[in-house]
Amino acid sequence: MFDLIIAAGGASTRTKTAKNKLLLPLSGRTVIENSILPFLSFCDLNQIIISAGQDTLAQIKTLTCPLYDKILFIEGGRSRTQSVANALKHVQSKFVLIHDGARPFITPEVIQSVLSGLEKHEAVIPAVALTDSIVYLNGGYKSCDRTQYKAVQTPQGFLASKIISAYNQTDEDFSDDASVYCQSFSDIVVVDGAIENKKITTSSDLMLPQSYAGVGFDTHRLVEGRKLILGGVDIPHTKGLLGHSDADVLIHAIMDALLSACGERDIGYFFPDTDPRYKDVSSVELLKKVMEILSSNNKKVWNVSATILAQKPKLSPHIYAMRLNLSKLLDVPLERVAVSATTTEGIGNTGREESISTIANVTLI
Ligand code: MG
């Protein structure tokens, strides 16, 4: 079991925002909520201790209480070190993880690495390699070998008794807990952190990762004697879509949107209808290939939103199954996969039930 301390006492002088940076909005919640949420899926979590400044304690309480039922709120001290020292007095578990309240991009993978490290070691911290060049400026300009340095992140994990002992032996202020720990002990183990697990220091840190939008459109003719497959879901109907592949018009439009957002050519280029390999192929298999192209471009899907234009059949009973399929195929949470359907009020090719079309929008990060 482990306790989690959230150091939430920092002033917001560097973000240059009137509001405390922990209370700033981020992805529909606040920074502090995002900093806590990824820990809640770990069943070994015993309790959370939030150490916050007097001015924001009430607001942080209101925001975080609905997230988890075992949160202890304590008033922070004059510095981060003092605030964590206060929080450590309430730790009940054998292990404690200490996390900055201003690190909202923490990933479950990093948390797991720290917890796994604690199975064998007594102090485990995540860190990442430096990408900028490093210079030492003390009476001159001396370049440094950046491979000899790492940037340290949180959560930092410790055997509770040892970090408490280390804190009891110092009155100095430090910027992290490993620095306090290594005043008394030297057995710190470093595991891989994550580039995205950055600390919110300036307001520009809150800008979302660079994103890429893409749009795709496709139409197929509706004929008798073919299956109707949309989003990989077999839909009972008297007609189906005609095409070289299974003519899944929803997946086709999404693939074109994905390729477009990558700045790549369209699906006709990658999967030409003159190629016998793609005769009657499931579009799900083609989408898997497109996902490989995305990976090779170092991009991931953030969300997808598609509208199917079909006069018949009624698609609403099948929307959830399509979203579920796409969520798995695109490796994106269900809530970021939207599929809607509309008729065209009997107008045009679609209205006359001669065709079904789809428009898709995607955002990649
Ligand atoms: Mg097509």
Image: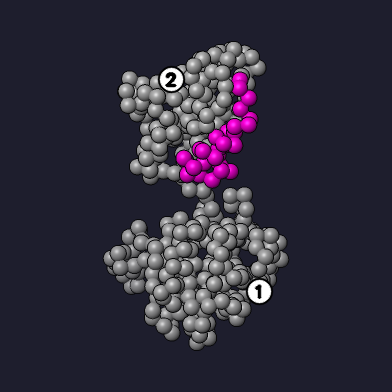
Q: Is mark 2 within 8 Å of ligand 1?
A: yes
Answer few, some or many: residues within 10 Å of disc 2's Cα (few below 14, many 20 plus, some between 14 and 19).
Answer: some
Report helix, strand or loop for mark 2: loop
| Quarter of the rendering containing residue 39 | bottom right
Report the Cα–Cα distance between label 1 and label 2.
Answer: 64 Å
Question: Per the image, is 326 magenta?
Answer: yes
Q: Are marks 1 and 2 in contact (CB under 8 Å)?
A: no
- The magenta stretch spans residue 157: no
Image location of residue 317, percent across then percent down: 63, 31
Q: How is the image coloured?
A: one colour
The residue identified by callout 1 is 74
Determine the image quadrant of residue 44. bottom right
**Observer-nearest of 347 and 15:** 347
Relative to residue 333, is residue 69 depicted above or below?
Answer: below
Q: Is residue 112 visible?
A: yes
Residue 165 is labelled as: none
Q: Which residues are magenta?
A: 312-339
From the viewer's perspective, is 255 left or right of 350?
Answer: left
Percent coordinates x, y for residue 244 in the rendering: 40, 21
Residue 243: image tag: 2
Dominant secondary structure of the magenta stretch? helix
Q: Quadrant of the N terminus?
A: bottom right
Q: Position of residue 254 (x, y in %)?
A: 48, 32
Relative to 13, is 215 on the left or the right? Answer: left
**Is residue 14 shown left or right of residue 66?**
left
Q: Earlier in the sequence, mark 1 or mark 2?
A: 1
Q: Nearer the viewer, residue 241 or 96?
A: 241
Res 268 → quadrant: top left
Q: Nearer the viewer, residue 247 or 10?
A: 247
Q: Would you say residue 15 is visible in this rendering? A: no
Binning the other alpha carbons within 10 Å of mark 1 as few (below 14), some (14 to 19) or many (20 upward) gives some
Looking at numbered disc 1 in the image, what kind of residue is underneath it? Answer: Ile
